[in-house]
Amino acid sequence: MRIRFLLLLLGCWLAVQAQAATVMVFGDSLSAGYGLRPGEGWVSLLARDLGPKHRVINASQSGETSAGGLTRLPAALAQHKPDVVVLALGGNDGLRGLPLDALRSNLASMVALVRQQHARPLLAGIELPPNYGQRYTRDFAAVYTGLARQQKVPLVPSLVAGFGANAALFQNDGIHPVAAAQPLIVKLVEPRLRPLL
């Protein structure tokens, strides 16, 4: 009787372990928590929401471009061995007016690297300020929607969707959301992330 009970407990423990996942957020300053206190950023809030069963690693780096991310990603995948990777890069490419073909190619290569490591990618885009011109901002957004459709990758179209025009929710630079906006980002990301867990 005792052995049967112990086997039942072991089975339950293994089931819980099988459902646990390691999530790696791989982004730029918007995900790194630029200008925020520790624990205020959306990645920290997401980890709190997911609870201790899941491990959330923030491998984001302020100032990162898609080219820099592509160079850095293999080592991060090898180190953290994630089950899910949130790719939240490209904002700095857009702000610098870099070629969109290079952004598309870099993001596609990162999706491929994630899948080669048997992890599941989630793509997250960003909105550019309107002063970059209607054509460039439209084509920039299309990089994410087109890649998500082509590669069959779940997509968060923009980390600031629904509040990007609200200046009160951004720091003085007009680019980085304040602490009060971080839960709004979690509400955008978490519904797309949950099915991948």
Image (tube, helix red, strand yellow):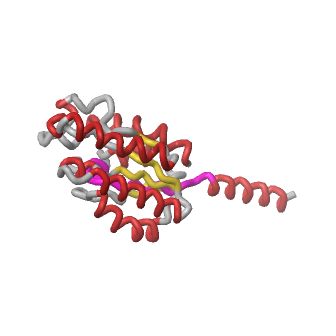
Q: In this view, does 88 lie to the left or right of 21?
A: left
- Looking at the image, which is closer to me, 20 or 176? 176
Which residue is rendered at x = 45% and y = 57% of the image?
Answer: 111
Image spot of residue 141 (x, y percent): 32, 40
Q: Is residue 95 left or right of residue 46?
A: left
Image spot of residue 82 (x, y percent): 49, 60
Which residue is rendered at x = 83% and y = 62% of the image?
Answer: 3
Image spot of residue 155 (x, y percent): 44, 42
Image spot of residue 61 (x, y percent): 28, 59
What segment is highlighted magenta in the picture? 19-33
Which residue is rendered at x = 34% and y = 39% of the image?
Answer: 158
Quadrant containing the N terminus in the rendered view: bottom right
Total marks drawn? 0
Q: In this view, does 172 lie above or below 82?
A: above
Q: Which residue lies furthest to the left in this view?
A: 172
Please tell me whether residue 129 belongs to the stretch shown in magenta. no
- Looking at the image, which is closer to me, 168 or 142? 142
Specify whether residue 160 is in view: yes
Which residue is rendered at x = 78% and y = 55% of the image?
Answer: 8
- Residue 166: quadrant of the picture: top left
- Residue 7: quadrant of the picture: bottom right
Specify whether residue 50 is in view: no
